[in-house]
Image (tube, rainbow, N blue to C red):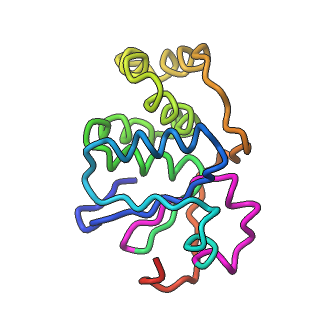
Amino acid sequence: MKITQYNKCIDIFYDSRCDICSSFVKWLRQQPCSCNLNCVPYQSARAEEWFQSMGMGELERQLVVRNDSGGMYRGAAAWVQCMLVCLAHVDLGERLSSASLMPVAQKVCHLAACNERLLREIFSLQNDEEVLAKLDRALLPSCEVGEVDEMVTILAGIPDGVI
């Protein structure tokens, strides 16, 4: 799961009511990235227009990323996509795309936004089991709206250029 060199921008749809998701998006906007970021809250008219054929209630509970080649990701896969475009964390994004670490991608992204020192300390460990154990002990608030943590690619019949 890599951001290809052809992607010049990604659209990140997030729930602006969630302080944790909003703080991550704010942090991500401040990072040097390999492409442009369009961060769109679900509560905006732009998101409503784009997702009008889908149930917003389900989507608002998940981060969704759309790349400019038409791929869409939600849940853990979307969080990984965000880390893959962040130039300082590409290696971390690639590591998170493994089957063993993908389930903790959201937690890792929240940790990146609030405590990069601890994040680097945890991921200096070579063994994924040690990383998971250390992450399990890290005290982080959970997302207020409750994310369904699954790796799913959304195949939406939405034409390019709407966003």
Q: Looking at the picture, how far across and down is residue 108, in whole percent? A: 50, 31
- In which quarter of the view is residue 103 placed? top right
Task: Say if 23 sits above or below 151 in the image.
Answer: above
Residue ID at (58%, 68%): 154
Q: Looking at the picture, how far across and down is residue 30, in whole percent? A: 33, 42
| Extent of the magenta region | 50-69
Task: Say if 96 sits above or below 38 in the image.
Answer: above
Q: Is residue 72 magenta?
A: no
In the rendered view, does 28 fall on the left or right side of 23?
Answer: left
Residue ID at (44%, 38%): 96
Q: Is residue 54 magenta?
A: yes
Residue ID at (45%, 69%): 71
Residue ID at (47%, 26%): 114
Task: Say if 121 sits above or below 80 in the image.
Answer: above
Q: Looking at the picture, how far across and down is residue 158, in whole percent? A: 55, 82
In the rendered view, does 22 fall on the left or right side of 121?
Answer: right
Q: Looking at the picture, how far across and down is residue 27, in whole percent? A: 41, 39
Total tally of numbered discs in the picture: 0
In the rendered view, does 28 fall on the left or right side of 91?
Answer: right
Q: Nearer the viewer, residue 76 or 61?
A: 61
